[in-house]
Image (cartoon, grey):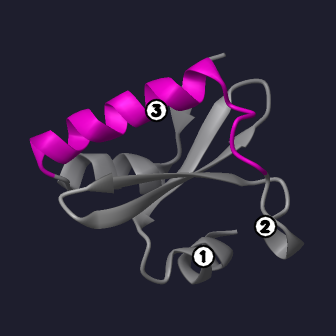
Amino acid sequence: MEIRFLRAAYKFLQKCDYALYLKIEREAEKIGKDPYLNKPLTGKLKPIRTHHFFFKRSAYRIAYKIEKDIIVIMIATRENFYEKLEQRL
């Protein structure tokens, strides 16, 4: 499975600092090894899964869905993450 980033996730990667970029890269590798590790969300966000990680005392989320490949929809801090994700869909 290949990991693909949608525009919002790609823009986040371009704007973040290099240390956070490397952390996200390692977390994406974890998702690539076992994409079914994280449980799917419920309600309107049902086909989407989220991966949680911490960086410099901040909680981050990676929202992705599994199709032919792993499609990363959004990467952001935990604050208002699910509201922003609903707006994107």
47 over 58 or under it: above or below: above
Q: CA distance from mark 1 to mark 3?
A: 19 Å
- Look at mark 2 in the image and give the residue it sits on: 45
Amino acid carrying mark 1 in the image: Tyr
- The quarter of the image holding the N terminus is top right
- The quarter of the image holding the C terminus is bottom right
Q: Nearer the viewer, residue 4 or 41?
A: 41
Residue under the image location 29 percent in, 47 percent down: 13
Q: Is residue 63 magenta?
A: no
Q: CA distance from mark 2 to mark 1?
A: 9 Å
> Which span of residues is magenta-colored?
17-39
- Other residues around mark 3 within 10 Å, as few (<14) / some (14–19) / many (≥20): some
76 over 64 or under it: above or below: below
44 over 19 or under it: above or below: below
- Look at mark 3 in the image and give the residue it sits on: 28
Q: Secondary structure at mark 3?
A: helix
Locate residue 42 relative to residue 81 in the image: left or right: right
Q: Is residue 28 magenta?
A: yes
Q: Main SS of the magenta segment?
A: helix
Locate residue 66 relative to residue 8 in the image: left or right: right
- Look at mark 1 in the image and give the residue it sits on: 82
Q: Which circle marks residue 50 in the picture?
A: none
Q: Nearer the viewer, residue 7 or 19?
A: 19
The reply to whether callout 3 and callout 2 are in contact (CB within 8 Å) is no
Residue under the image location 51 percent in, 75 percent down: 81
Q: Secondary structure at mark 1?
A: helix
- Other residues around mark 1 within 10 Å, as few (<14) / some (14–19) / many (≥20): some
